[in-house]
Amino acid sequence: MKEVLETLVETRTAEVAGNWGTFGGSIAAVLAWIGSQDVAAGLGVIIGVAGLALSFWRVRFAARIERAKLTPEQRATFEQS
């Protein structure tokens, strides 16, 4: 399971999906709001928040993977700075 998560985080797919979800959902929400389409605006907000959450999770997990790859000496130096 750990290898699958590392592969997912390191691929460009998760990054692109998060970014497109954030921007696409936001744009859809604004356009639907302007057009007085409440359901579409709500769906756009949900998609935007999901994309933002995916981006946040990916960056956080990628940092955790990088810290795990450090040697104890490198980790001590990293934590001091």
Image (spheres, rainbow, N blue to C red):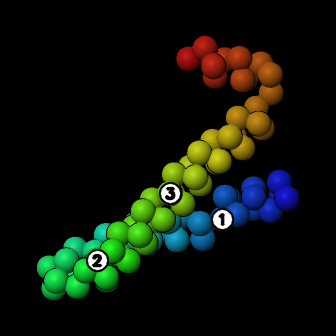
Mark closest to the chain's N terminus, 1 or 2: 1
Q: Residues within 10 Å of mark 2 (few under 14, many from 20)?
A: many
For the point 66% across and 65% down, which residue is it?
11
Q: Nearer the viewer, mark 3 or mark 1?
A: 3
For the point 80% across and 27% down, which residue is it?
71
Q: Amino acid at mark 1?
A: Thr
**Where does label 1 land, which residue?**
11
**Where does label 2 land, which residue?**
41
Name the image quarter holding residue 3.
bottom right
**Where does label 3 land, which residue?**
53
Residue 49 is at least partly visible in this image: yes
In percent of width and height, residue 44 lies at 35, 75
Which residue occupies the foreground of this view, 24 or 70? 24
Q: Residues within 10 Å of mark 3 (few under 14, many from 20)?
A: some
Secondary structure beneath label 1: loop
Secondary structure beneath label 2: helix
In percent of width and height, residue 20 lies at 43, 72
